[in-house]
Image (cartoon, rainbow, N blue to C red):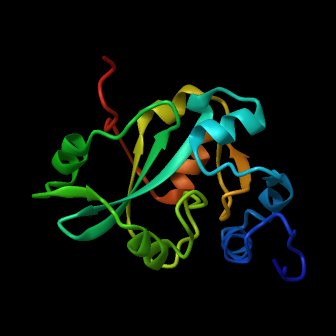
Amino acid sequence: MTTTPGSSPDVHPRFAEALRGLGLDVLVGEVRRFPEATRTAAEAAAAIGCELSQICKSLIFAADGVPVLVLMDGASRVDLERVRAELGAGKVTRAKADVVRETTGYAIGGVPPFGHRERTRVLADRSLLAHEVVWAAAGTPYSVFPMEPKELVATAGATLVDVREPSA
């Protein structure tokens, strides 16, 4: 991976550019890269050594065909009916890999919570606020960064909602 001046080889160039544009250059130095993939929340939590719920998953769904980003803690699943109701949509489905890449500029497993190619509506589940720090993908399936949840939600331009599946 090539890097731009002032960036790190651990950070996806588009994500590093987004951080700089948001005035969050300091986060470039906080990105951690792992030799093994952190594509899933479980892989990321194991590599970092944190609780599964401290992982912030960035998931793209299609609400009546329009991409929407849902930020969810790593221990929970998104309740599509709750997302549908929150958005007032007729139908919500998980977006296909090509739609995820077109919309965000990143591959599934490396989608960060902000810094996407296209601006989308963002929903963040309140469960993320249960921690002082959460970890999110930094643009590749091998890199993550830490951030205070309220700052992450604000930076992503997210609306706080309750969209996780109820516990069984």
Q: Relative to the observer, which residue lies in front, 153 or 163?
A: 163
Q: Is residue 140 above or below residue 164?
A: below
Vertical relation: 81 (above or below) 99:
above
On the image, the x and y values in percent for residue 66 come to 26, 70
Extreme residue toward the front, this view:
36
**Quadrant of the rendered structure where residue 67 is?**
bottom left
Asked if residue 134 can be seen in this view, the reply is no
Q: Quadrant of the C terminus?
A: top left
Q: Residue at x 57, y 71 (%)?
A: 106
**Which quarter of the image is occupied by the N terminus?**
bottom right
Left or right of residue 57, residue 31 in this image: right
- Residue with the most extreme top position: 168
- State the residue at coordinates (58%, 41%): 41
- Residue 134 against residue 116 in the figure, above or below: above
Q: Residue at x 78, y 57 (%)?
A: 27
Give above or below for 47 relative to 71: above
Q: Is residue 130 visible?
A: yes
Viewer-proximal residue among 134 and 60: 60
Image location of residue 121, percent across then percent down = 35, 63
Residue 93 x/y as whole percent: 25, 57
The reply, left or right, for residue 2 in relation to residue 50 is right
How many labels were placed on the picture?
Answer: 0
Q: Position of residue 140 (x, y in %)?
A: 68, 63
11 on left or right of 161: right
